[in-house]
Image (spheres, rainbow, N blue to C red):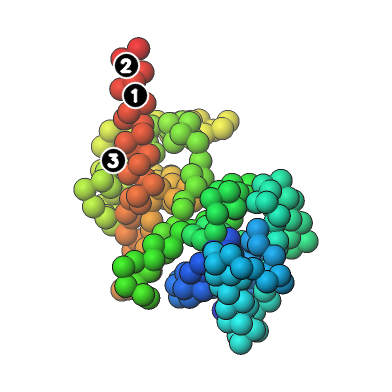
Amino acid sequence: MKSDGERAEGRNIHIMSAGKGLESTFQTAIKVYPVGGVVIVTDVDIEEHHDNTEKSDIVESVRSVQETCRRVDWPCEVIVVPHGSLELLRDRVMDLYIRNPENHYFFNVTNGNKILSLGLFMISIWIGGEAYYIDKGKVKGSGKVLPLGVPKMHLEDVLSNPNYERVLSALLPGDMPMKDLYPRMQDGYQPYREGDKKAKRSLSRGTLSKWVARLEGWGLVEVVHTAKNRKDKIVGITGDGRFAIRYIEASRARSSAG
């Protein structure tokens, strides 16, 4: 049986830029995300003695995370990137990914210098990882995880089918049962041709379910099953979905303005 930090097809690996307070943000992250291994990225040689207070704090934070990983038996690797070289950072993380493409990668960009943090965020986009930032809060232990979502589609994908926008607009006032969304979408349905198939003159429940599933895959809506009956679904728009609607409206207004 797989552990909590390990999926059937691989491990959940957290790659973090090192800085003061790394241990604190790490403790916040593991309350939210599963962990199967840790990789710490730093531009400071942790094996050397440093008179510089900032560097000493980084070394201490790295060793603290290493000790946490040792206690729970999580693999922990430290990657030293001299001078914060983005090219070297990219190559080292890509080496990890090539060796274990089945793993799922999380990127904690909270700590460390801006170059390393931004570099990790860019790499998360390239390999399809999940980046997040820890809002440390004013009180110790009150930090919150802020996922840094990356769009999973282009605006053209949403605009390709006018009914996608209609689904999102219908959900703006609040969550809605799928059974209630269907009649709303029937009213004003715009026939849409997908691939080589002919456009259907009327909307079927199956077609609507397929559209909602696609929007869910793009992270624009969320679908939850009710406790009473798993066939009953509640659909709600996400923050990214609201942003997509606003962006579409802004783009349309800009086009109209010429």
Secondary structure type for disc 2: helix
Marks 2 and 1: CB-CB under 8 Å? yes
- Viewer-closest of 178 and 49: 49
Which residue is identified by label 3?
169
Residue 202 visible from this viewpoint: no
CA gap, disc 1 and disc 3:
15 Å
Where residue 70 appears, as percent x and y from the top left, is 64, 84
**SS at circle 1:** helix
Q: Residue 23's x, y, as percent?
A: 51, 74
Q: Which residue is denoted by mark 1 in the rendering?
A: 252
Q: Which residue type carries mark 1?
A: Arg
Q: Residues within 10 Å of mark 1 (few under 14, many from 20)?
A: few
Quadrant in which the C terminus appears = top left
Q: Are marks 2 and 3 in contact (CB under 8 Å)?
A: no
Task: Identify residue for label 2.
Answer: 256
x 32%, y 59%: residue: 234
Q: Position of residue 15 (x, y in %)?
A: 61, 63
Identified at 78% across, 61% down, the residue is: 99
Residue 204 appearing in the image: yes
Q: Which mark is residue 101?
A: none
Q: CA distance from mark 2 to mark 1?
A: 6 Å
Identify which amino acid the numbered label 3 is placed on: Ser
* 242 up-or-down from 253: above or below: below
Q: Amino acid at mark 2?
A: Ser
Between residue 190 and residue 66, name the one nearer to us: 66
